[in-house]
């Protein structure tokens, strides 16, 4: 370990500067913390001094450099409250109600984060930083941290390019082929889907302008009045890092300061624990891995759904690893093994794993594409339906609504995915795409973060649309002037023609008389 630290020290001295970076990932969800801690660790391994603010304590902090962690315990309380709700019950909720809920959640998390940072217990505001990296998740008021520290601001988008983050860097979001993340559409939408997408887009934009942003403005003004002007919080986004990649997400327009780094959190494959390795190695027909992520309690699914899954999985030849949140699973067949935790990335990397039954979370989707494993998606909430729809369109997945599961449709889906080689072939093609990159995604993230610091916020990367009002951006002022001139010319022409016709009629009458 001393040798590794010495090598890193030499790299810092010879190749560049050590920067002090603040990383703020406030969302009370383990999957979000996985991304934040992975980015922080990568920056530390590159020789930088990193402080991460989040609701979680890193159980295995890196020893390769200076890595500090500030735990916002109040946000962990929100996590515990959310865990008490049954997410299976909201899986079929109206997406037009989901957007207001996400705004409300964002307001609560933002307020608690600002109060915690400003509390007497915290000395973080007295420190100095070279850069602020903020996970953006409906928390615009937190952008004032960059103003407070007088540093450039890097945003991190956990779900790829979408309506939430695109406007912050001036990137277009055409609703004709950019689906809203709550609707579960792909980029190939029919008429009615495009209509719903436009309605959702319009509703979110109006709510953002008249409800959400004013509230965020007040939060920022309350805690950092010196960083709030007449137009709202002083936000000046230098770079937007996105947890996405062309192999996973739909191709969409990017402005120069948007960078895809999807897959940066994936670690080199480690050897599985002895008993688990033996279990998978000895599976002659292969293994099906089943996990619904870190936010869902699988034990809370309905008895009918549970019975259908147990019966269908019990009939297949493959062994099953099921990430289950309790000690026992009554009614499970002999081929099913349960555990409260499995090393997911290392399991998916094993060649004997034939299928991943997943909720369709973006991290799980990226990991299964990275390792070339087909998907049976059982989406529940958030962006999972959209991720599942993209996977089905990509030919490496099938998807079933979690509330519509029966033994027959699960069995049919399992038989197709396990016996038709096209799904695994398409998954392998996607895997080849995510590996076919000029540089590793973590190296790309570190380069651009350092680039922004070196170039004082890189203002030359920002597009001019950020300086336009909404009506200027849509050219409504130009269209209005053109319409007014056109209508005026038509009206004047009409009057001239009318007068000309009347004069001719008068001439005819005079001649006839």
Image (spheres, rainbow, N blue to C red):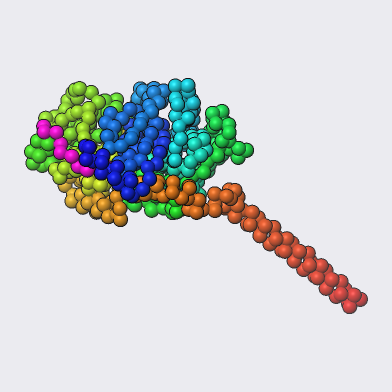
**Which quarter of the picture shows residue 407?**
top left
* Residue in view at x 59 percent, y 48 percent: 469
Q: Quadrant of the C terminus?
A: bottom right
* Residue in view at x 14 percent, y 29 percent: 333
Q: Position of residue 114 (x, y in %)?
A: 48, 28
Q: Residue 266 colored magenta?
A: yes
Q: Position of residue 254 (x, y in %)?
A: 43, 53
* Residue in view at x 39 percent, y 49 percent: 448
Whether residue 482 can be seen here: yes
Q: Which residues are drawn in magenta? A: 264-276
Whether residue 374 can be seen here: no
**Which quarter of the picture shows residue 209?**
top right
Q: Is residue 192 left or right of residue 1?
A: right
Closest to the observer: 286 or 140?
140
Q: Quadrant of the N terminus?
A: top left
Q: Position of residue 248 (x, y in %)?
A: 32, 48
Closest to the observer: 423 or 28?
28
Tell which residue pokes out farthest to the right in this image. 513
* Residue in view at x 35 percent, y 31 percent: 68
Closest to the observer: 324 or 350?
350
Q: Residue 460 colored magenta?
A: no
């Amino acid at each position: 370990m001393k040798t590794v630290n010495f090598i890193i020290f030499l790299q810092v001295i010879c190749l560049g500067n050590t920067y002090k970076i603040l990383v703020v990932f406030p969302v009370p969800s383990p999957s979000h913390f996985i991304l934040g801690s992975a980015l922080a660790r990568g920056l530390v391994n590159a020789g930088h001094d990193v402080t991460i603010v989040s609701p979680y304590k890193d159980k295995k902090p890196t020893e390769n450099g200076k890595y500090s962690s500030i735990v916002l315990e109040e946000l962990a309380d929100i996590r515990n409250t959310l865990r008490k709700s049954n997410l299976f019950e909201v899986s079929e909720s109206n997406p037009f109600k989901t957007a207001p809920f996400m705004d409300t959640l964002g307001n609560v998390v933002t307020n608690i984060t600002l109060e915690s940072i400003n509390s007497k217990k915290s000395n973080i505001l007295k420190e100095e930083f070279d850069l602020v990296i903020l996970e953006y998740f409906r928390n615009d008021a937190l952008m004032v941290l960059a103003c407070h520290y007088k540093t450039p601001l890097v945003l991190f988008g956990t779900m790829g390019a979408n309506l939430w983050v695109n406007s912050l860097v001036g990137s277009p979001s055409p609703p004709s082929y950019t689906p809203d993340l709550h609707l579960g559409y792909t980029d190939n939408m029919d008429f009615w889907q495009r209509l719903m997408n436009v309605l959702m887009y319009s509703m979110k934009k109006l709510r953002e302008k008249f409800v959400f942003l004013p509230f965020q403005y007040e939060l920022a003004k309350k805690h950092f009045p010196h960083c709030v002007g007449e137009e709202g919080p002083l936000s000046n986004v230098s770079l937007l890092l996105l947890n996405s990649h062309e192999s996973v997400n739909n191709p969409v327009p990017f402005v120069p300061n948007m960078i895809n780094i999807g897959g940066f959190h994936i670690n080199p494959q480690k050897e599985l624990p002895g008993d688990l390795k033996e279990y998978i190695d000895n599976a002659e027909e292969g293994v099906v891995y089943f996990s619904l992520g870190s936010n869902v309690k699988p034990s809370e699914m309905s008895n009918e759904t549970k019975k259908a899954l147990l019966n269908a999985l019990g009939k297949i030849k493959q062994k099953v690893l099921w990430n289950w949140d309790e000690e026992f699973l009554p009614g499970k067949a002999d081929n099913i093994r349960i555990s409260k935790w499995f090393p997911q990335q290392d399991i998916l990397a094993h060649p004997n794993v034939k299928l991943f039954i997943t909720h369709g979370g973006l991290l799980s989707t990226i990991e299964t594409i990275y390792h070339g494993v087909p998907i049976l998606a059982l989406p529940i909430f958030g962006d999972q339906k959209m991720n599942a729809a993209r996977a089905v369109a990509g030919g490496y997945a099938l998807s079933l609504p979690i509330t519509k599961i029966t033994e027959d449709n699960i069995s049919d889906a399992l038989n197709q995915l396990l016996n038709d080689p096209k799904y695994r072939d398409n998954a392998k093609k996607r895997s080849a795409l995510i590996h076919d990159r000029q540089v590793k995604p973590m190296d790309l993230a570190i380069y651009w973060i350092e680039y922004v610091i070196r170039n004082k916020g890189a203002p030359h990367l920002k597009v001019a649309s950020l300086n336009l009002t909404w009506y200027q951006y849509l050219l409504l002022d130009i269209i209005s002037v053109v319409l007014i001139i056109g209508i005026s010319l038509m009206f004047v022409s009409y009057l001239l023609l009318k007068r000309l016709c009347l004069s001719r009629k008068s001439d005819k009458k005079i001649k006839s008389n």
